[in-house]
Amino acid sequence: MDAAPVNADSLPIRRTPRWWRRFVIASRKANFFVWLEIASLIALVVAVTATYLTYSREPDAGELLPTLQASLLLIATLVPAMAILVFAGRRLAMRRAAGSTARLHVRLVFFFSIVAAVPTLLVAGFAAFLFQSGVDFWFSDDSRGLMENANELAQSYYDANQADVQDETIAMASDLRFFFFERGGQLSDDNFPDFYAYQAQPREITESAILQRLPDGSLRTAAIMNLMDDNRWLEFSQKALPKLDEGQFVAVEGSPERIAALAPIDAESGIYLYNARTTEASLFNSWERAQAISSSYESLTADARTLQLRFNIALFAVSLLLVGLAVWFALRFADRQVEPLTDLVGAARKVGQGNFALRVEGRTGADEIGLLNRAFNRMTAQLEKQTDALVSANRQIDDRRAFMEAVLESVSAGVISVDGESRVMLMNSSAQSLLSDESLCEAQPDELVGRPLSELSPEICQMLNEGKERQIVSHARGNELLTLAVKAAPSSSGYVITFEDITRQLLDQRQAAWSDVARRIAHEIKNPLTPIQLATERLKRRYRKQIEQDEELFDELTSTIVRQVGDLRKMVDEFSSFARLPKPVFRPEDPVDLVRQAVFLQEVAHSDISFEVAVNLADRSNIRCDRHQLGQAMTNVLKNAVEAVEAKRLEAGEGFEGTISVAIANSGETDSEFLTVSVSDNGIGLPTDRDRITEPYVTTREKGTGLGLAIVNKIVDEHGGDMSFATGTSGGTIVTLRFARDPELAQAEAVL
């Protein structure tokens, strides 16, 4: 059920104070927040530097920073750091917000972050103050004095016990020295055990032994009293003897179980007294604990400032974490609150761009946003319904136009539409490739629109000016002369011109006609040649001996007949070769070997000419070709080069050095699609009508038949290649033959 409509006039309008609006406008113009961000960053750097310098200064032992100073350093570092986090959240909100809801989104994030940052800062400052106060108490002079007094008390007790054992051992050693050396007593005396016990027991000596050092440095016991079996007395005595030898009067050592002492009775005789008093382990452990506690306290006192710094760093990290979480929560909350409005604004923009099928999937409740969403969906539904008919009509028009464009681009004939002033209005790609030279072939068809037709084809433009509707014209495309069949039809805005390239068609027709002529000539001439030659040879054999006068003349006449018959036979053979050139049989062949053999034959026949072969093949694999026909083509080309060099030699004189160079290389888009053989010479060069030299019976030599290059052109064409001519840099001719590595595949692709 839809909610009741809301009257916008009845809604209260909350006006923003004027001073606040002025402040907002001024801050935007002055980039107020940018300057705040820069100031916060500078303040953070200054605070961190001051904190580092303060804590890195070498303090006196146990000296702490004052509580107020440590707390102020923490707050001075937290304030700019929190400000940077808040500003970062504001910038992130600006990036995530869009449209007219961006300001609302940014304000929510900014104020939520401020509300979270201020209490966090207060709590952190109060916690730092409390901690610093506690640290001041624990590291105060009273606490340090109490710890030192306890340690001194335990140490004095232990030292007094050690001093008592030391004094008693010295006194007992003196009494034993008096007994042995003044009174002359012996260990074997009957009263010595009682005397020994009387000396030890009043002194609270629990273990005692009289030791004698042997010449090898070892010790043996001369008399013992309650001596333990753990041999600790021996280890202690051996460690203490070097000290006594250095002049020390007595050696004392304490352990958890006993306090031992060693004193000399008579050092010269090597007699020593070992005494030990057993102590309570708990007392020794208490002394050790007191020492450890005192040492730990001293260590903490030395690192008091480090402890302050660590706590401040922990408070700093926790505070920043809380503010960061608050910023993240503010972003999430703002997204959730502003998302419906953002979706609606974005949908309105898309509808303005023409997307009438868009529907808002947000809230559809009874609140204002739900009401606005439903009204928006009804509006877009009506707009979509009204525009469907227009879209359908435009689609039909576009389909027809696309069909016509596809037809124009797919046909091989060139199509041009020109206006009344013979300016190009429309041109397909076939027309561009037929009429444009190399500089315009790569241009887009739209770039040629508006150009005069006379710039592309003056011949077709002249035909239109003469009012002709169809004509065969010759068009020069670069160095190539094309024959075009042109038709022109009037249109509402000008003319529609169609034309096809019939150059190849005319050439094929001429070659077919010449092939028929050659076949007839070969048939009519070849039949009488053999009888003429046989009759001449028979006359020579039969009447040579009967002629007595003019023998040389007879021989010359008969030889001339035979020689001319041979020349006619060669001409007939060439006619036959051109007329009945067999279909090539393709097999894998080595092209380099084939070319070298053809060059070798000419090199042997013409030793006065320098031949060079250059192979520049990255791929030396075989090509599919008819070896006989390819050899015939190479022989004809090399023969023409030799004849051109010899003609040049006749013009230049005997000092002329003829050279013929053959280069074999790869070419094509894949660099191995075609095999190119270039034959260059320094002969007389190309004739002026070079475009016709491949036509049958066109020759520049006196005895030439005009079939050599025609045969070569036919062989190259059936091998999926082409032949071109160029003038060398220093004169002469460069003939380039290009063969497909797989002629059958090349012919299939040409058909497709």
Image (tube, rainbow, N blue to C red):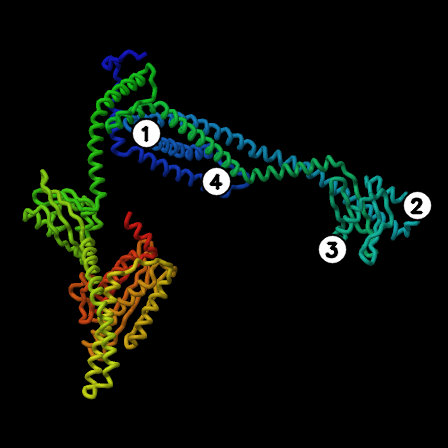
Could you tell me which secondary element the residue under label 2 belongs to?
loop
Q: Under tag 3, what secondary structure?
A: loop
Helix, strand or loop at disc 1? loop
Mark identifier at residue 55: 4
Q: Earlier in the sequence, mark 3 or mark 2?
A: 2
- Indicate the amino acid at tag 3: Glu
Mark pair 3, 2: CA separation: 35 Å
Of the image marks 1 and 4, the number of the one nearer the N terminus? 4
| Lower position in the chain sequence, tag 4 or tag 2 | 4
Q: Are circles 3 and 2 on residues that touch, CB within 8 Å?
A: no
Give the image quarter of residue 559: bottom left
Is the N terminus in the top left, top right, bottom left or bottom right quadrant? top left
Q: Nearer the viewer, residue 352 or 474?
A: 474
Mark 4: give few (<14), some (14-19) or many (20+) Cα within 10 Å. Answer: some
Give me the C-alpha separation between circle 4 and circle 2.
Answer: 74 Å
Camera-side residue of 277 and 169: 277
Residue 493 position, x and y percent, is: 9, 39
**Amino acid type for the residue under numbered disc 4:** Tyr
Q: Are marks 4 and 2 in contact (CB under 8 Å)?
A: no
Q: Amino acid at mark 1?
A: Ala
Say which mark, if any, is on residue 246.
Answer: 3
- Circle 4 — which element? helix
- Look at mark 2 in the image and give the residue it sits on: 191
Up-down: is 478 above or below 491? Answer: below
Please give the label number shown on residue 244. Answer: none
- The answer to whether 451 appears left or right of 271 in the picture is left
Q: Residues within 10 Å of mark 1 (few under 14, many from 20)?
A: many
Which percent across, then down, holds residue 716? 28, 59
Q: CA distance from mark 1 to mark 2?
A: 109 Å
Residue at (66, 39) in percent of width and height: 291
| Residue named by callout 1 | 97
